Image (cartoon, rainbow, N blue to C red):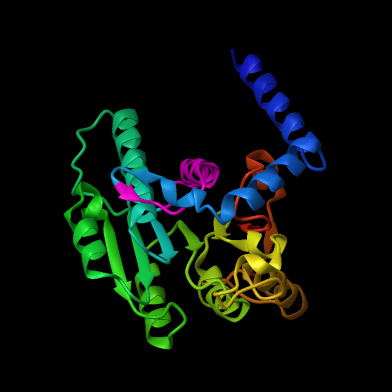
Amino acid sequence: MKNMHEEFLKECQERIISYANSEVKRAAHAFMVASTIPKYSYNFSFLGRPIIQYPQDMVAMQELIWQIKPDLIIETGIAHGGSLIMNASMLAMLDYCEAVEAGRMLDPQATKRRVLGIDIDIRAHNRAAIEAHPMSHRIDMIQGSSIAAEVIAQVHDIARNYTRVLVSLDSNHTHEHVLAELEAYAPLVSKDSYCCVFDSIIEDLPDEMYPDRPWSKGNNPKTAIWEYLRRLTEEGRNAADGAPLAFEIDKSIENKLLITVAPDGYLKRV
């Protein structure tokens, strides 16, 4: 049975590698271009809350959470709260599975695993809906700019109490803002965990797609990722745990997904 599973995983890996420069990848990019203006990503929800995301990236987050088993997920950008609810539900599933494996009763309230969401403007109706959701007992929210010094300090203070941290950046998509978020929050990522930077696809889309937004080609999350990684390589930094800080772009995730808003955006701490 084990050999059959290993063979299956090997076939998956070989297939994913083959997608890198394939016709199916070009077709997927064409879909990304065609589906952006019609707001395809606005059509989905998770456990009843709208989640402005492509289903493929939702699956990727599920896989990463299962793999990493974080006790804290930090998210910038809340909107309707669907991502907070999704990630909180995945943390609840980790607690459930661990209780089953240990043969103990599960108390949903007795958990350390939490999701921390940050947004400059948490609309009252969205906050009310999030707080009314059954997953709300796992969620904390901070209203304020994710790059404000006092917010950064608050998040760092909270993160000190956790050992496995995953970060998701999905707020203002300008180069300057995302670079500041990376400087602030990437050092909190635990070894072998991820900093997931969404909407890096902006760099790969026609420039005229965002005429009413402050981001564009040359000014977006992907350019911020490149600059941040350049700084890490040239300057060297330490993570919050004191160890040297280094990230690599996990291309295998985007090659597997094909359809993703985060090309070059799945950053693994190594």
At 67% from the left and 55% from the top, the residue drawn is: 263
Q: Is residue 51 magenta?
A: yes
Q: Position of residue 197 (x, y in %)?
A: 57, 62
Figure disc tally: 0
Q: Nearer the viewer, residue 128 or 16?
A: 128
- Evaluate whether residue 92 shows in this view: yes
Magenta region, main secondary structure: helix
Res. 192 visible in picture: no
| Residue 156 placement, left or right of 1 | left
**Quarter that holds the N terminus:** top right
Q: Is residue 6 left or right of residue 195?
A: right
Across and down, in percent, residue 249 comes to 69, 57
Write the start and end of the magenta stretch as one range: 49-70
Residue 185 image point, x, y percent: 51, 72
Q: In the depicted view, which residue is nearer to us: 84 or 214?
A: 214
- Name the one closer to the observer, 25 or 39: 39
- Taking depth in this image into account, of 112 and 212 the one nearest to the observer is 212
Q: Is residue 66 toward the left or the right of residue 6 in the image?
A: left
Q: Quadrant of residue 210?
A: bottom right
Task: Look at 69% across and 65% down and name the residue there.
Answer: 203
Q: Above or below — where is 192 with respect to 107? A: below
